[in-house]
Amino acid sequence: MGRVTRRAFTVAALAAFSTASTASTASTASGASAAPPRRAAAGQMRGMWLATVAGRDWPSQAGLSAQRQRAELVAHLDSAVRRRLNTVIFQVRPTADALWASPYEPWSAVLTGTQGKDPGWDPLGTAVQEAHARGLELHAWFNPYRIANHSDPSRLVAAHPARKHPGWVVPYGGKLYYNPGLPEVRAFVQDAMLDAVHRYPVDAVHFDDYFYPYPVAGQTFDDAAAYDRYGGGFPNRAAWRRANIDLLIAETAARIRQARPGTRFGISPFGVWRNADTDPRGSATRALQSYDDLHADTRRWVRENWIDYICPQLYWHIGNSAADYAKLLPWWAEVARGTATRLYAGEALYRAGDPAQAAAWQDPAELSRHLTLAARHPEVGGHVYFAAREITQDRIGAMTRVVTDHYRQPARAPR
């Protein structure tokens, strides 16, 4: 397909999705019969991320028996219940692989130590069942484009789609990525992720901050051929890249609604959209910008109601000179105000008590102060903590302080 034709398709698809979202918002604002914004519903997000990439939180090591892996997974769910949390965001596709029996991608190596090897049980199905039995929501967390945390395709299992389609792959920064600029890649990763939604009653689909990869000094993400083929009509490559990610978000949202109505779509992006020095609509920060550096127009997704919730990673302490939590949280509250997109704050529990972090993170009350500040902003519907390992370890008692100060009673998750 030629460049101009692909450009026309891109514009038409985004325009159609934007028009539908705008019409829905307008009918609500005019007092028509449309439902009120979902964010108005009762409930409070109290979530934790359960990361599996490189065995970050689970399993404790690859190759454990199915019984031991299951026991460790259930222990994380029980830990969430003890902390009066109500949502677990479980990473089920960490590196173009799967924690369920996927017809599209191999079993993840984090389970057995060997990519493609059947672990003998169903981690995602078990997580959904056991979470729901405990009154927890289970959000399935996917990484759309990351293939491997190394740069050697031969280390992938022979049947891996990245080996069958080497033209889809871009090595960058010592890792392998699918090229977001290829329509066939975008279709494939959606098929692979939506397979889990078809199979399991997950409460939400969740993406984190990995779209185009984080910049690596002195290296170029080589998508020149794709840009030459599909980038016609865009003012520059950055605008084309943002359109590619916009299409991923818009199409995924529509397909989730079709596959399992009621399943939500949430994204946890890097916490800075743009700095005010770059864009007057931006935040009073001096940090990496998701719009420019990751080509993720996160503000647009909220303002145009493309997603059900956004959970920006506000991983800085109050008073940070480059990105102050006390300035970023109100900025995001203003972005979410008047939309149907719920706002939750992503919290850096992992920093608490880490001696390599700033002095503020050595104070067990730092995170509790975040929740106190957030309570002044009605747009903030809750918090999600990174990550499960720290929920259990609670190095300096920061999570205990949050529970004591703010979670004295259980709360149901927002619906």
Image (spheres, rainbow, N blue to C red):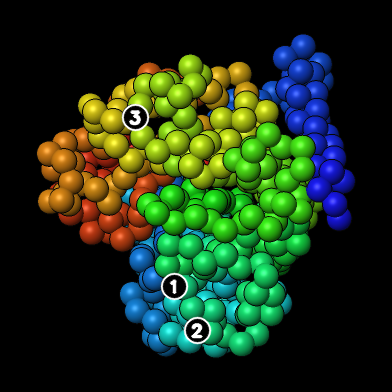
Q: Earlier in the sequence, mark 1 or mark 2?
A: 1
Neighbours of disc 2 within 10 Å: few (<14), some (14-19), many (20+):
few
* Displayed quadrant of residue 259: bottom right
Q: Position of residue 248 (x, y in %)?
A: 68, 49
Q: As drawn, is 267 to the left or to the right of 363?
A: right
Answer yes or no: do the residues labelled 1 and 2 have beta carbons within 8 Å?
Answer: yes
Q: Earlier in the sequence, mark 2 or mark 3?
A: 2
Q: As drawn, is 251 to the left or to the right of 133?
A: right
Quarter of the image with the N terminus is bottom right
Q: Earlier in the sequence, mark 3 or mark 1?
A: 1
Per the image, the residue denoted by label 1 is 150
Per the image, the residue denoted by label 2 is 155
Q: Is residue 15 above or below residue 157?
A: above
Q: Position of residue 31 (x, y in %)?
A: 77, 13
**Judging from the image, what secondary structure is the residue with disc 2 in?**
helix
**In the foreground, 238 or 32:** 238
Q: Is residue 317 above or below residue 130?
A: above
Q: CA distance from mark 1 to mark 2?
A: 9 Å
Q: Position of residue 210 (x, y in %)?
A: 51, 52
Q: CA distance from mark 3 to mark 1?
A: 30 Å
**Residue type at numbered disc 2:** Arg
Per the image, the residue denoted by label 3 is 286
Q: As drawn, is 50 to the left or to the right of 295?
A: left
**Residue type at numbered disc 3:** Arg
- Residue pictured at 69% horizontal, 80% vertical: 164
**Residue type at numbered disc 1:** His
Q: As drawn, is 259 to the left or to the right of 60?
A: right
Q: Is residue 130 visible?
A: no
- Residue pictured at 53% horizontal, 36% vertical: 291
Q: Is residue 3 visible?
A: yes
- Residue pictured at 35% horizontal, 58% vertical: 388
